[in-house]
Structure formats: structure tokens, C-alpha cells
Image: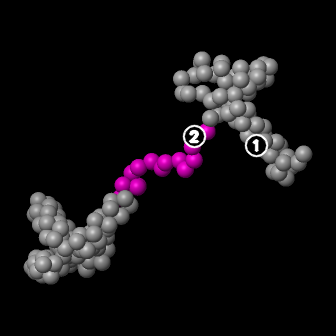
Amino acid sequence: MSTLAENELNAFLAGLPLYKRKELEQGPSAFSSYSQEEQSAWTEWMTNTPVEHDVLRQEYVRLLQRVPARLRDYVRRERRENDQIFAAYLPKIPANRPRKDSLADEALQLKNAGHSYKQIAIRLKVTREDGSPNGEQIRGLLKSRRLKARKADSPSGKNQN
């Protein structure tokens, strides 16, 4: 059955001009491999009959659905090309979790005022709505900031106790 479906797909593609066949089988990246005549013919075709392009693509996908291996390749290629297209327009997602600078600053002010880590945690839970950490987490946050400050102050950039 798959040979019949593949023959039907090949017959459909054989009836198309080379530039249309390349565009369907290779996607938009095929445009760079077009000859000068193919580029001008493709541009004219897309400008004058964009609806025909959509109809051709729908028919191509309908025929591909009967040939799973080629459909899989088509879907992978489309996803890869769409990811590349959309990546240029989407903002970059930061790799690490957001820093807690404001929380650390508040905790440091309270610690300098003589509060314990537990007291700091209790006070922050009352004033903040973002699920503030417990006393042990406050201690760890302030400790990490102290270590970073020491490393930044040392001449070699390393901790020298």
C-alpha cells in the first residue's frame, strides 16, 4: 500500500515545475538553490497566485500522510525551519533562575539591624507576597552574597582567608 501511495505522491510532484517541487520537498531553504529563472518564476507565482501555493501545499501534505517516513521528514524540517524563523523574533530566555537581589537587600538591612535569620524570615513573610523563604534559606542567601563580596574584594579574585 505504501508503494501505491508513494507512487501517487511522486506522480503529483512530477507534474509540477522544478521550483515548486523543490519548495514543497525542501521548504523555504530551497530558495537559495534556485537558478535565476526559477527564482523569478517562483516570485511571480507567489505574487500572482498565493492561494494556489496553499492549495498545493495542502494536497502535498494530504499525500504525505499516506507515506509515514516522508511525512516524518517533512514535519521535522518544518519544525526546524519554523524554530529558526521564530527564534529571531522571540526574546532570549535567561538560562538561570532569576536573582533575588531585592530579597537579599532587605534581608541584609534587617540582619545589620540586629535581627536573627528566623526574625528576618518572619518579617519578610509579612511584607512580601512572593512566598519568602524561611530562616535557613535567608542565612544561605546572605552567606552566598558575603562569599561573592569577598571574592570580588580580593586582589586575585579568589577567597583568601
> Dot 2 lies on which element?
loop
Give whichever of discs 1 and 2 has the lower sequence position: 2
Q: Quadrant of the C terminus?
A: top right
Whether residue 96 is in magenta: the answer is yes
Decide which of 17, 10 is in the foreground and name it.
10
- Compared with residue 45, is residue 1 higher up or lower down, i.e. above or below? below
Q: CA distance from mark 1 to mark 2?
A: 17 Å
Magenta span: chief secondary structure: loop
Name the spot of residue 155 as percent of width and height, x first: 86, 49
Whether residue 92 is visible: yes
Magenta segment boundaries in residue numbering = 85-99
Q: Residue at x 67, y 24 (%)?
A: 121
Quarter occupied by residue 70: bottom left
- Compared with residue 22, is residue 146 higher up or lower down, i.e. above or below? above
Image disc number at residue 148: 1
Whether residue 98 is in magenta: the answer is yes
What is the crowding at mark 2: few (fewer than 14 residues within 10 Å), some, or many (at least 20)?
few
Q: Residue at x 31, y 68 (%)?
A: 77
Residue type highlighted by circle 1? Lys
Name the spot of residue 47 as percent of width and height, x first: 16, 62
Name the spot of residue 63 as percent of width and height, x first: 14, 70
Quarter occupied by residue 87: bottom left
| Residue topped by disc 2 | 98
What is the crowding at mark 1: few (fewer than 14 residues within 10 Å), some, or many (at least 20)?
some
Asked if labels 2 and 1 touch by Cβ distance under 8 angstroms, the answer is: no
Residue type highlighted by circle 2? Pro
Q: Is residue 5 left or right of residue 93?
A: left
